[in-house]
Image (cartoon, coloured by chain):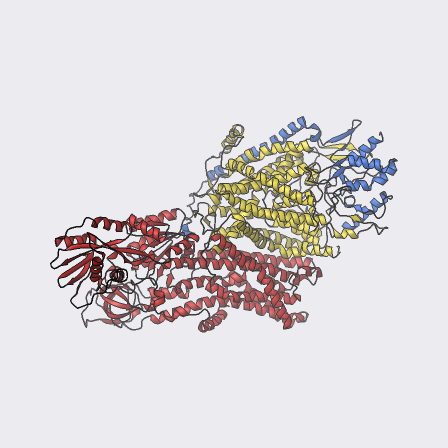
Chain colours: A red, B yellow, C blue
Amino acid sequence: MNQSMNVQVPQAAPPSQQGRIGRRQTTVRQPRQNLSLFEPKILGRAVIDAFKKLDPRVQARNPVMFVVEVGSAVTTIEWVRSLIDPHLQGQQGFVLAVTLWLWFTVLFANFAEAMAEGRGKAQADTLRRARTETPAKRLAPGTTDYAPGMPFESVGAPQLRKGDLVLVEAGDAIPSDGEIVAGVASVDESAITGESAPVIRESGGDRSAVTGGTKVLSDWIIVRITSNPGETFLDRMIALVEGANRQKTPNEIALNILLAVLTIIFLLAVVTLEPFAIYSGNPVSITALVALLVCLIPTTIGGLLSAIGIAGMDRLVQRNVLAMSGRAVEAAGDVDVLLLDKTGTITLGNRMAHEFIPVNGTTIDELAEAAMLSSMPDETPEGRSIVVLARDTYHQNEPHDNGAVTFIPFSATTRMSGVDLPGREVRKGASDAVLAWATARKASTPADLQPTVERIARAGGTPLVVAETRSGAKPRILGVIYLKDIVKTGMRERFDQLRKMGIRTVMITGDNPLTAKAIADEAGVDDFLAQATPETKMKLIREQQAGGRLVAMTGDGTNDAPALAQADVGVAMNTGTQAAKEAGNMVDLDSNPTKLIEIVEVGKQLLITRGALTTFSIANDVAKYFAIIPAVFVATFPQLQALNVMQLRTPHSAILSAVIFNALIIIALIPLALRGVKYRAVGAGRLLRDNLLIYGVGGIILPFVGIKIIDVILAALHLA
Amino acid sequence: MTFTFNGLAQIAVFFLILLLLTKPVGLYLVAVFEKKNTWFEPVLRPVEKAFYWISGVKEDEEQDWKAYTVSMLVFTVAGLLLLYAIERLQDKLPLNPMHQSAVDPALAWNTAVSFSTNTNWQNYSGETTMSYLTQMMGLAFHNFTSAAVGIVLAVAVIRGFVRRSGKSLGNFWVDLTRCMLYLLLPICIVGALFLVWQGVPETFNGSAVVTSLEGFKQTIALGPVASQEVIKMLGTNGGGFFNANSAHPFENPTNFTNLVEMLWIFTFGAGLLYFFGKVAGNTKIGWALFGAVSFLFLAAAVICFGAEQNGNPLLNTVHATKDAVVSVDQTYHEYALAQPGGNMEGKEMRFGIGSSTLFATVTTDASCGAVNSWHDSYTPIGGMIPMLNIALGEIVFGGVGSGHYGLLMFAVLAVFIAGLMVGRTPEYLGKKIEQQEVKMASLGLLILPLSILGFSAFAIVYPHGVSQISNPGPHGLSEILYAYTSMTGNNGSAFAGLSANTPFYNWTGGFAMLIGRFGFVIPIMALGGALAGKRIAPAGPGTLPTTGVLFSALVVGVILIVGALTFFPAYALGPIVEHLLMLAGKTF
Amino acid sequence: MASVTTAPAAEAAPAPEPRAETILHMVGRFIRPAIALTFLLTVVAGILYPLTITGIAQAIFPSQANGSLVYKNGQPIASSLIGQYWTQPQYFHGRPSATSPTPYNASNSGGSNLGPTNSALQAEIQANIDQVRKENPDVPDTTKIPIDLVTSSASGLDPDISVAGAYYQVPRIAKARGMTAAQVEDIINAHIQGRFMGIFGEDVVNVLELNMALDKAQGK
């Protein structure tokens, strides 16, 4: 029953509470959200960065590309040698071409990484602009109240330390993260959330946290600073989107190890080829060996691996989710159980009037009219839904407002609201409260009231009892409004999808088990936790984890913090408390609990993209062997022409085509690496089959075609 | 390629028999290693307990992967030293009716390593080098124990994969003892008597001298062959009593023995796959791997058979010196004038092409290395198949143990590479494949090409290395490649034309065998140890399916692309170019 | 605040190593079992096992256990499983043998190990063809020589030849023995050993058996 309390605030619900769904469509976003994949500005910077990253110290972090760079350097020396050594004169053009394309390979990989970083950097720039330059108004320690014209000391934001108190008035930027000590203000948080509608921030409760870089639009607040300079949310956010000190994620590290070992293996295969070739009377040129090596080592995935990781984080940022670690993004893909809060996630945040049930012989029209009347000035969603129901379903006319109506708002003590008209009072509210009110006015309690109230509660609804007094008539109880939890449309399909993905959903609610079960059944979740307390939530998470499952949840209150910390993926709402934000490993700037599902999808998408490109890269080798091996040895053993299944024209064009394909495929796959492979919610078996066909079998076939086409083009252009 | 119905039928029927044996053998392995009741309990249990009492082994004490591995290493080194000592002192020890002299140090080292690593590469001719004491105590002991060690290591690794709690992998000493007493010895006793029945000698007389109908005197080497032969096959050792190994009529007299010997090679490998699925709680997991290796086995067997049945086209152009019209007939005839045809050089009549190539495939799919025909005389493609089988890590059904954990390594890699494509971090049997697992699996993957290609490249540019080649041209490269492939893979079969009984080959080969055995075992044990005790995520619709045809195909793909392609450049200059040159009519 | 435990990190920290394992402990755990089991298993596998097998084999399969020797007039003339070197025209000849120093050396088995593109193989085959042609001048030149008659066997002790290989020698033997070709062919047909289970291996004839049957047919 308490659920309805927190939404019946005296004024219009703040935007952060209002309609948690559907708001992405309705609000204006900052331009940073609309950066296209190949924004010219980013492109330009990425090209420059690609060259900067040629620094061997940067390359050394990526063993695969480091080997390519060393190879490029070796062939460059070979080319210089070919200019001097008359024996190598005929090779000049070929060696130069291979050398250039090897350098391009390195540059393309650098470019991919720079592109992925570029988007983050552009966003970081926007965020940096939000850093306040205006001086903060520091108050004397211990100040707790506002007085117009109160004295303050003007200091720069970087001088503020934890514990300082500052005054922020309308038009000021909030200098740093903090907790509101006094005051209420509407705050523009668009710099952080990209959300243009202002939100209300006030002292006390769960909405007292403010973020540095946001702007106070009206009123004033006194803020206690909670972060030292450089540690603020904005700072961390900038660091995150920029990928400045991006840590490789566990799976990425493991993959890097495999790629490094594969590189060593192929290095071994190529290095030992020379002795074998010498025995066969056909030493292979260093250029050809380097070309073979570079084609065999997994350059495609090696070049794109970090771009995939950065882009994955970036996709979350675009959804206004900040992951505090890459580990959390990977874990999101692995989630087995989603704990979803009922309110706001599964059901609309507000209950809707569903039915009027008259008692004690009252007519339905009488009840509907009274219910409508009592709700006319009521701006809460429940109130409006009662009006809508009465008007649309029960065909009540809206009464003419003659100005004599007094609205009695809801309050926590009365737990009811209503209107007073001359000679008439109407009340609606919690059954015991209204009953007490009516009984005090000598109304009798109808026999069919209690069963109706109970029936509604059992069905998962909230009963509001309506009573009235009229001058000259006996006060009476008219009936009950059935407020129903409305399950959001499409949730059942969503949960079916999740089930197909192998993810179980558990609904968390404070409702009693009966109500919870009714809603759980309607929504189609797999399980529910009723009368949830922080302790039972925690217990549930531990149980699931003990069974080997990974758990994701959202939370905003301070009492959610332990559970957020325990969960494998804990998404804290940006509206939530500082404690919650620190406990979770992600922060949702939109504070939209439904986002959890998207987060899981982004996590999966990241992993799929990585796997797909790894598979593709390794599968590519087959064709490259068939291009280069016959080319290298055909001079000594013309019979090896039989292995030249692509019928490449000359040995030089065969080797060059393979090298060019190897370089171009990196460029060609950048969009895929940045956008991610599309994730479809089907079973793992089908996903594996489809992706194996596309990236595995496709990865074997495509280079045969690609290398052949490049060979034909080279021939047409008389280049090799 | 030429195929005959009968040749393909041999492959198919052999495979079917293997299929039928897999489950019962697997269940028996479960009984032995999960300490369930075996049939021999009443007799052997007291013996087992006495063994523990004498060696101070606490039966219920479990070891983590490090203790297990150290136990294995200490035990192996002890056996290695003992064998070396016996070889060097055999002239002074009893049971030496042929008066063999002490084995030279390099050969003794090579042989000691060879037998203690389950390789059984033989740089000596059995009849003329080793005393009966060496053969029995030194070699036979290792035939048993190196096989048992392989099996128990596989069992330990499997435990790491499937166990739900704790970090322990079992107790090496207990596993070893049970493997010897309950598994190897009972089968060997029955098997040896079967072989004697079929004609395999079992005597301590040195040799028999006969005078043929034409008056030629023939000295026929004999010995306790049957008892060695069965463990040689069952333990996938492959070291023959005679130089001709399983081609010798006394080691492998009939097609019945040939069939049974091939089944012995594969039995434990196939059974371990069932065992794996069974202890993992889902036999389909084992069958999925069974399916993958079945494909590799059948493909290899069919290609090898087709290449050999096709014969050597060069021989078609060889004519009698004075008479150009005469030529040889390499075609297969079924009826009236029946003959196997094909490339019969280095093959026995009774086995023909079908049973020879099937044996060659089986012995190299697993790490056996016994041969009933000379792989060196195979056509280039026919000979490349056994070499490739070994280079893949002998994972096809595998030797006793070693193949199984090699296959698990590939399964882990397959899961890691492609498993991401279902949108979860990789997991196998519900256990996450993370940094440590990938590191160890990659190390294992690295070892084979490192040793094979590294030593071969060294030998091929080292003048002495090349001088020992008997077949010039690309075939010479194949001989050296095959030698180090076989030694690294602990197989023991050979392109025997290479005269490898020289200090260079004895020493480098010894190291190749050690690297191939322990460089592979230790990372894989570490992999098992890392997986042990990891929590198991329950399988659901969102987890990577590790059963079924799709997963089998994935494993095959990874084996071929990640495992096989590494050797493609070297093979291009060896068997592949030799094949093309042979078709072009070129000889060396 | 509860410590953050994310799933992939669930792998527990390595268990603390037992402190300062004493040498005695090491001996107990590793050295003693290794030495004891090496000794025990050597006794079991190296001594008891072959002795047991030999004992039983000698008792129940004495002929096979001692090499399947064939006797004539109380003298051992061959092992039925081991091929022999045949040179006289009235006997069937076996396959070429690469054993050294002499063919069919039954104490040093082995094959030629000649590779398929080795010119030495061509030379060897050519020599074998010459030999076969010389021995069988009555076979028409147009008859192709069965491959097994000119290729070395694996063991060098192959006791068998193909049916075609036997038929190829019929004219020579018939002539040398004064038998009709049909008589010789009948003897061949009576000694064809079929495949195991009808599938495994090849149809072969054992040279020794044929030659003994020939002698027997002529009352020798």
Determine the residue positioned at 55% across, 68% down. Answer: A103
Residue nearest the viewer, comparing A130 with B509: A130
**Residue B190 vertical position relative to residue A508 in the rendered view, above or below:** above
- On the image, the x and y values in percent for residue A418 come to 18, 60
Res. B409 visible in picture: no
Dividing the picture into quadrants, the one containing residue C70 is top right
Tally of marks: 0
Res. B168 visible in picture: yes
Dividing the picture into quadrants, the one containing residue A206 is bottom left
**Residue A96 vertical position relative to residue A527 in the rendered view, above or below:** below
Q: Tell me the quarter of the image containing the C terminus of chain A.
A: bottom right
Tell me: B493 left or right of A123. Answer: right
Tell me: C184 left or right of A120. Answer: right
- On the image, the x and y values in percent for residue A574 come to 32, 62
- On the image, the x and y values in percent for residue B299 come to 63, 49
Dividing the picture into quadrants, the one containing residue C138 is top right
Tell me: B461 left or right of A452. Answer: right
Tell me: A290 left or right of B526. Answer: right
Q: Residue furthest left?
A: A472
Residue nearest the viewer, comparing B337 with B76: B337
- On the image, the x and y values in percent for residue B254 come to 69, 37
Residue nearest the viewer, comparing B132 with C135: C135
